[in-house]
Image: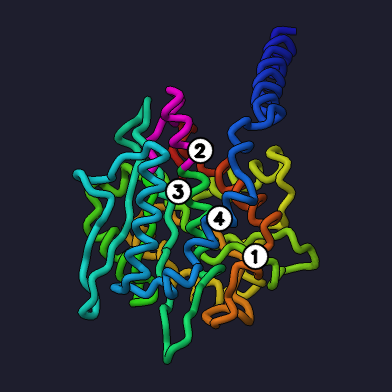
Amino acid sequence: MKRISLFASFLTISVFFSHTLLGQWERVDENLIHITQQKLFTHVSLLANTITQGRATGSQGALIAANYIMKQFQNYGLHPYSGNSYYQSFRTEGLVGRNVVAMVKGRVYPDEYLIISAHYDHLGEINGTVYPGADNNASGVSLLLQIAEIFGLRAKAGDAPPRSVIFVAYDAKEHNLAGSEYFARTLTIYPYQVIANLNIDQIGTVLEPPNRKSEYLLVLGAEHPSRDMKLIIDVANHYGKIGLDIDYTFYGSKTFFDLFFQIGDQIHLSKRRIPSILFTSGIHAYTNKPTDLPALLNLAVLEKRTQLIYLVANDLATRRSWLRNY
């Protein structure tokens, strides 16, 4: 009888905690209301505008784009990541590159960090033709800015996340990942202080679905750095009622999975043993072409992807437990 009583007590406690956890997901995160298709399109349209001339590293257009991103960080109430400047300047191939980096200070674990990143540079103008790079990667930066806005608004309202969140817009991805390499090499915090890096690159289209569903998302690296990451993403997708078709295999090709992960900005933080993953909608016929224009983007799906990545980021910035490694 005593053994049955103990089992019944354990079952009651387990059910209680299960209902408590599920109850948290039954309430829609009120911050999702700040994510809108109009805001996403506004960011993309500016970054892929003729005034930025394709955002080539070292160009006037890239400086305009960097200044726009910096102003958004300022407006959201984010602080510079290091020192008094949002810019992190470096040299590559005779050019001056500028990462734009800002952060929200955590209110409980200020010395623990989540890094969210996306590159803003593109190919610029080649032989008189501008390569606007709307999907690659104005789409990723627009998503980054939407999430930065939410965390900034929360901080202003006294609801900053428990962990600090660093937002970095990389320059010079098209120059052998020079911006992300410089950021990782000069990181002013220890890698063990970083719970994860979420990198976003080319995420605005529905042109290359892995299956038949157009509302999809490709995720690279989720099963490699931690046994928890895939679960966090799947739970956010299901209980957040996002409903994206998530592919973790990069179209079932391990060869292309490994290659695509190696050529993304997340690789340099990954090499420093920081759990790093890449969110993307894949390459397509318009990638690195002059026809990569804002009209290509599916704003409704981009909005859903932004919602999902915010929920994942919020989980990582909030959870009490650290990620478990394999």
Labels 4 and 3 touching (C-beta < 8 A): no
Tell which circle, 2 or 1, labels the residue nearer the N-terminal end. Answer: 2
| Disc 2 to disc 3: CB gap under 8 Å | no
Mark 2 secondary-structure assignment: helix
| Residue at the outermost front position | 51
Kindly report which numbered mark, 2 or 3, lies closer to the viewer in this rendering: 2
Residue labelled with disc 3 = 325
Which of pointers 1 and 3 indicates the residue nearer the eye? 1
As drawn, the residue found furthest toward the right would be: 212
Q: Mark 1 belongs to which amino acid?
A: Leu
Q: Is residue 40 left or right of residue 58?
A: right
Q: Residue furthest bottom?
A: 127
For marks 2 and 4, the one nearer the N-term is 4
Instruction: Name the image colouring.
Output: rainbow
Task: First in sequence, mark 1 or 3: give its number.
Answer: 1
The image shows residue 78, relative to residue 119, as above or below, that is: above
